[in-house]
Image: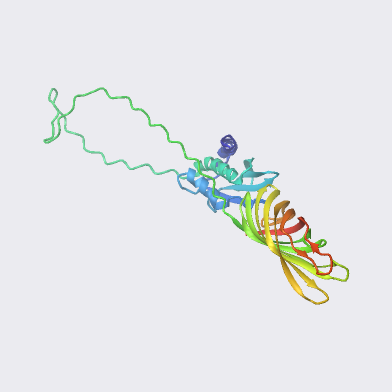
Amino acid sequence: MKRAALSLAAALVLAAPWAFAQVAPRGARLSYTRGPGTEGCPEEPSLRQIVASQLGGVDPFVSDGAWHIEVVIRRKGTAFQGRIALRDRDGRDLGGQEHSSAICGVLVEDIGLALSAVMRPLLPPRPAPESPPASPPPPPVPRGAAPPVSPGAPPKAPASTPLDPVAAPARPVPRPRPPPDHPRLQLGAGVLLGAGVAPSVAVGFSALAGARWERFSLSLEARGDLPIDAEPYRGWTIGVSGLSGSLVPCGHADWFFGCAVATAGGVWHVRDSTGREFALPYAALGFRAGLEAPLSARLAGQLSGDLLINMLRPHFRPIDGKGWSAAPVSEAVALRLIAFF
């Protein structure tokens, strides 16, 4: 990481002398852009803070700077890619380089370290400390006479050979920590096909709300299955529907994610002949795997599949005939749209 940051700084510094010959060192304008799939990356204030921490707390970026620095963060495969471009007042390209990292916070940190090396010459020089006024020279001493000693002054120690001063070791500049990964709100909705709970394949809808980090998410989901007709015994017709809620923690890596699913709810039966309605409890545990493709800076599409073990299986058994019960294992395929805030 450090070698990559140094090479990035060197590439930009090589273009600096030509630019200094044309413009006054008045800082630089900063453009910071995050592409699709990088919603969890640090925002522009975090990058400014990293640069300022290396420059003694001074933010070198101004709105009317002579230089224009463009930083673009994109997602490329399983890694994050950052592009830095340095341009002059007329938009001419003065240099740049691309850098990538598997962790977006580390990528932004290395970009900030490289920019601090480039922006250091643009800072105004610190004023030199004022020297105290010179004291008047002492009166001349006659040859052979000892210099006058002020009353009350301590006796002068015998002269000794001065020791060679030893320079204090330079203190290393602390490497700033990557900015914290703050969670964002995620909301989603979609359609699904489920099997194993009702007597046949059911069409349903789902909605979710939760928190999303760069590599982790935690959501609460609600699922409703539309009624379907079933005939568990000749002459009996019932409508079966379902309603459940789930706790879903997920791990994310690039476009892929895997989750654990804990579900609880009920299955409703309605007998057509009598209109009598009754509910049976349902619970299941299992796993989810899927793909998440970024559609924009705040939207993503998800395609997922669930495989659940039905821990509490609802069943329906009429008095005078055979009954029906949920399968030991249930499956579901869902297509969702996720929004990030």
Q: Please say which color scheme the image uses.
A: rainbow
Which residue extends farthest bottom? Answer: 274
Instruction: Give the number of marks.
Output: 0
**Residue 26 visible in the snapshot:** no
Image position, residue 60 (x, y; %): 51, 48
Q: Residue furthest left?
A: 151
Residue 239 as seen in the image, left or right of residue 52: right
In the displayed structure, would residue 227 be above or below residue 115? below
Query: How far across and how far down the image is residue 297, in percent?
Result: 67, 55
Residue lying furthest right = 234
Residue 256, image x, y percentages: 71, 48
Percent x, y for residue 241?
A: 77, 67
Q: Is residue 149 left or right of residue 5?
A: left
Is residue 212 in view from this perspective? yes
Q: Nearer the viewer, residue 193 or 48?
A: 193
Q: Quadrant of the N terminus?
A: top right
Q: Residue at x 86, y 67 (%)?
A: 233
Q: Quadrant of the C terminus?
A: bottom right
Asked if residue 59 lies left or right of residue 262, the reply is left
Report the front residue among 290 and 127.
Answer: 290
> Which residue is at 72% across, 69% downward?
279
